[in-house]
Amino acid sequence: MSPATSSPLDPPPPPPRVRVEGLRKAFGNGRGRGGGTVAVDGVSFSILAGEIYGLVGGSGAGKSTLARLVLRLLPADAGRVWVDGQDLFGLRRRELRRMRRRIQMVGQDPFQALHPGMAVHELVGEPLAVHRVGNREDRTEMVRRALDEVALSPAGGLLDRYPNDLSGGQRQRVAIARAIVLEPTLLVADEPTSMLDASVQLGILNVLRSLQANRGLSALVITHDLAVARYVCDRIGVMHAGRIVEEGPVDQVIAAPLHDYTRALLAASED
């Protein structure tokens, strides 16, 4: 038997952490007909455990709408999403609340994401209180650990500070700490560096890579920037007009793009 041949006794490959099939979402009358707009048009993809998958495309491609469908923040017109084998669209309210612990989101604007009247320890600890995780001492330790994981150390010096006392990069790290404090299995990051200065973007991307390495965290990263995707993603799907027009390992897609839209994105990024 050659090394490339698998044995019938070999265990099957693990199922994907996230499986998306045929998602569709339209806005306006007629669900895309008679003046309506189809934002997501029959999209399917999967994310493996410990994998960072990127959705890349220009403004209006449907990336953020797709992310909100995956999070069940928007109702889908068609399609299904499975997370860790559970049909997300089939969950009742109480079941969905429990699932929320395992799926968290980081938005693009850290200036809007954090309540200005809450201190850092309150912001990061709030999800623990909402989901009734641990006692006060447990929560304090979990908050400190989350802040350490996003490279805000020593955490003790930040716990009582407020968002207006922090830089943009620090705010985004606090937002990520808030998202990971519940120890999710999937993080959805929607343009996590687009509102930040170029000098701090790399640090945020390194935080995502560190979480992937240390926690085995899976992530869906939404970005218009192919350089961001190449640095942080394992695989990407290129979105255009609501569809994934090309998909594959990030280096392969960037080195030898097959679709004209991917080539256009690459040309724009090189200008």
Image (cartoon, rainbow, N blue to C red):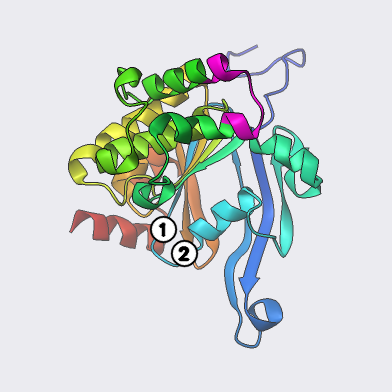
> Which residue is located at x 30 percent, y 17 percent?
154
Residue range highlighted in magenta: 128-139
Give the amino acid at mark 2: Ala
- What residue appears at the point 33 percent right and 38 percent down from the top-left corner? 162
Q: Is residue 251 magenta?
A: no
Residue drawn at x 70%, y 36% as measured from the top left: 99
Q: Residues within 10 Å of mark 2 (few under 14, many from 20)?
A: many
43 or 153: nearer the eye?
Answer: 153
| Residue 57: image tag | 1
Q: Which residue is mark 2?
A: 61
Q: Secondary structure at mark 1?
A: loop
Residue 131 belongs to the span the image colors magenta: yes
Q: Is residue 18 visible?
A: yes
Estimate the x, y position of residue 25 in percent, counting from the top left.
Answer: 64, 66
Q: Are marks 2 and 1 in contact (CB under 8 Å)?
A: yes
Rendered residue at 43%/35% (across/down):
176
Q: Can you name the residue that lies furthest to the bottom here?
A: 34
